[in-house]
Image (cartoon, helix red, strand yellow):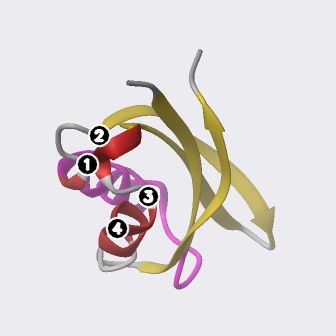
Amino acid sequence: MGEVIGLIRVMPNEVLEDSQIEEMINDIKAVIKSPARLGNIEIKPVAFGLKGLNVTVVVPDDAGGLDPIAETIAKIKNVDSAEVTDVGRAL
């Protein structure tokens, strides 16, 4: 059985302070449950002080994909959207 690596782009609903971004990161870490594994979270400047997050997640082939994880992340406080932007197979 293989694994799938996906990138989920998370956008906040407004310009957030660094402490609010850290809180959002901690909330994302809390919602990613086994069998999924968190790979990396990277803060990306977008424009005019707005910062998005690139969240890398690894899931087994038979775990149901990345969309349910993105939907759960989209429900977190201060999150406007969470979209799967890239998917690949782990070697």
Spot occupied by residue 23 in the image (x, y as percentages of width and height): 30, 56
The three-letter code of the residue at mark 1 reads: Ile
The three-letter code of the residue at mark 3 reads: Ile
- Whether pointer 3 and pointer 4 mark residues with C-beta atoms closer than 8 Å, the reply is no
Picture quadrant where residue 45 is located: bottom right
Cα separation, mark 3 vs mark 1, equals 17 Å
Spot occupied by residue 82 in the image (x, y as percentages of width and height): 51, 71
The label on residue 21 is 3
The label on residue 68 is 4
Q: Is residue 41 visible?
A: no
The three-letter code of the residue at mark 4 reads: Pro
Which label's residue is closer to the chain start, 3 or 1? 3
- Front disc: 2 or 3: 2
- Front disc: 4 or 1: 4
Answer few, some or many: residues within 10 Å of disc 3's Cα (few below 14, many 20 plus, some between 14 and 19). Answer: some
Which label's residue is closer to the chain start, 2 or 3? 3
Indicate yes or no whether the magenta region holds residue 64.
no
Q: Secondary structure at mark 3?
A: helix
Q: Secondary structure at mark 1?
A: loop
Spot occupied by residue 18 in the image (x, y as percentages of width and height): 47, 55
- Front disc: 3 or 1: 1
Q: Is residue 43 left or right of residue 75?
A: right
Q: Which residue bears the numbered disc 2?
A: 36
Which label's residue is closer to the chain start, 2 or 4? 2
Spot occupied by residue 66 in the image (x, y as percentages of width and height): 44, 57
Picture quadrant where residue 75 is located: bottom left
Indicate yes or no whether the magenta region holds residue 13.
yes
The three-letter code of the residue at mark 2 reads: Ala
Which label's residue is closer to the chain start, 4 or 1? 1
- Whether pointer 1 and pointer 2 mark residues with C-beta atoms closer than 8 Å, the reply is yes
Residue stretch rendered in magenta on the structure: 12-30
